[in-house]
Amino acid sequence: MTDTTQKGRILLALTGWSPDVWLDELGRAAPDRPVTLEPDGAADPSIHYAVVWKQRPALLSKLPNLKAIFSLGAGVDHVFNDPDLPQVPIVRVVSPDLTTRMSEYVAWQVLDHHRLGPRYRAQQAARIWHEDRSQKAAADITVGIMGLGELGRDAAAKLRVLGFQVSGWARTQKQLEGVTCYAGAEGLLPFLASADIFVVLLPLTPDTRNILDRSLFSRMTKRGPLGAPVLINAGRGGLQNEADILAALDEGLLSAVTLDVFQQEPLGPDSPFWSHPNVTITPHAAAASVPSSLIKPIVAQMDAHDRGGKLINLVDRKAGY
Amino acid sequence: MTDTTQKGRILLALTGWSPDVWLDELGRAAPDRPVTLEPDGAADPSIHYAVVWKQRPALLSKLPNLKAIFSLGAGVDHVFNDPDLPQVPIVRVVSPDLTTRMSEYVAWQVLDHHRLGPRYRAQQAARIWHEDRSQKAAADITVGIMGLGELGRDAAAKLRVLGFQVSGWARTQKQLEGVTCYAGAEGLLPFLASADIFVVLLPLTPDTRNILDRSLFSRMTKRGPLGAPVLINAGRGGLQNEADILAALDEGLLSAVTLDVFQQEPLGPDSPFWSHPNVTITPHAAAASVPSSLIKPIVAQMDAHDRGGKLINLVDRKAGY
């Protein structure tokens, strides 16, 4: 018989997601750890770990025996929206499944713009047979990746395999095989001048909020084979100034955008994005958090930590991601 | 001074393509080889090499000093349409540029079906925000590649990197890292039962003409996450029975198709393919023959052959490709 008292309970704290599948997976992966959706009072001593997606503010603040918080998303901005977040380690989800799905999405959308998907679909609708003989090869195109964490690095490697030139930008200097890396404020301008298609996989922090604005777009100086740069945001809606994106499209600073994320989700039915001819929308579907692939590594970390081991994939609280 | 007489002339024999850019590239790559669009009579002794795209039948048959024929396409069925083809070596174009472009196209279309591109575009048009939470990962999908030449092998490797399972079928048994390979008539049924998305990169020969027919589709037995298999033909239109494709879509034997090639090109404006909701059409644009990347290796082979070297990428006349 396992000593469940010693192992403590898991608090599953979700907003906007149905808990059922997560409860099922936790039950399967940690049969010896009881799971609850609500603590027994603000100071419930039985809660040892919290597994969260947009937890309710202050929910975790007074739990005396909370050892760590596990985020169910690769981004952790939703965790930091809680002003009373307790001083315990925060663990981001890193799952090969999530990473691979995001790279699928990035490759798909980069190729769709590079290979003139919108134009050929419009031609099909008009029954027009016309090959664009000026089609460039991937080697003629540079994809600039903003954010070089797990997701950005995997996407960069796969875009390289497909033949694209790749540049990248991150807060701190990275070294990636075959990728021209830029860092920090001083690296931003040369980065923006380096690429034809920009893929945004940045964490949402006070430093990056609204970073995708007119001044940024106006510094994307490469006009390249597509006429103007393409923007693909698969990070967070809070990174983007949406009025500026629409204006940049209309002014020709951007030729096209793909947005998987928005300031407000779901995107309201009146948004001008839906019907803009140069906008591709997906409903925050780039890389689903799939319970079966995420819960096992989380429980494995709880077990390791209980045995005195170190937590991995920790969030840097100061950097905010 | 180069002895141009000794080197002989190049006959550039094109149907349906403008010769101008090819003349320019040949002029640049082989300044010491005069190029002509017409021989001086059927038995012109000055022609040493022919560079062809759908050459006029019998044009080459009586040239006494013709040493080799260079095809400007990866497929060579257009060369064999000539019943009076002389018995000289035929060289297929193999260019990293062409191969990479084809793999871009294959990855693009495989991802567009796998990631539910048509459905999300329809939802956008209807202003519907709905994530399909049953989205599979690439690892849950097997892509079956018909034809494992240069193009098929490169596409297989890149699909593997993107996370897909890959199987392949060819006339003769191949060994490819990480790819389940089937061969010949006895391998066809297990191959057809192995995959969710089929990519056709076969050569067009008497054996493969009309191979994509109802009996083939009815043996694609994997219903998988997409409901029914997907067919992507980037090979030749002659491989496909077009009435059978339409019927298979309507019967649910196929869930969707992407066709870059057709029995008749350009596709006529009355074709039912244009407006079928489960058909994606591109205008034979998968992998353009780009003069600048094709002509240099062709001229390099002429030079090597004139020095007594061996021609590479030779066509097997018996196999027809």
Image: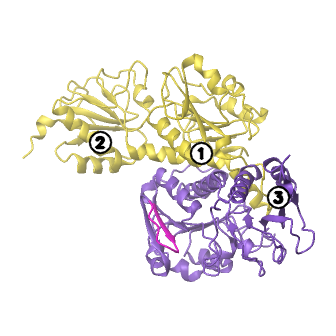
Chain colours: A purple, B yellow
**What residue would you read off at disc 2?**
B297
- Secondary structure type for disc 3: helix
**What residue would you read off at disc 1?**
B163
Q: What chain letter is assigned to the residue under label 2?
A: B
Report how far apart the C-alphas of labels 3 and 1 lie in the structure: 40 Å
Same-subunit check for callouts 2 and 3 = no
Q: Which part of the image, by quadrant, shows the C terminus of chain A?
A: bottom right
Which-is-in-front pick, marks 2 and 3? 3
Report how far apart the C-alphas of labels 2 and 3 lie in the structure: 71 Å
- Point 44% across, 64% down: residue: A175
- Secondary structure type for disc 2: helix
Position of A36 with respect to B132 (left or right) is right
Residue A232 locus on image (x, y percent): 60, 65
Residue A86 vs residue B4, the one in the foreground:
A86
Q: Looking at the image, is B136 positioned above or below residue A181?
A: above
Q: Amino acid at mark 2?
A: Pro
Q: Amino acid at mark 1?
A: Gly
Quick one: label 2, few (<14), some, or many (20+) residues within 10 Å? some
- Point 47% across, 40% down: residue: B154
Q: Looking at the image, is B312 positioned above or below residue A74?
A: above
Residue B164 locus on image (x, y percent): 60, 42
Quick one: label 3, few (<14), some, or many (20+) residues within 10 Å? few
**What residue would you read off at disc 3?**
A6
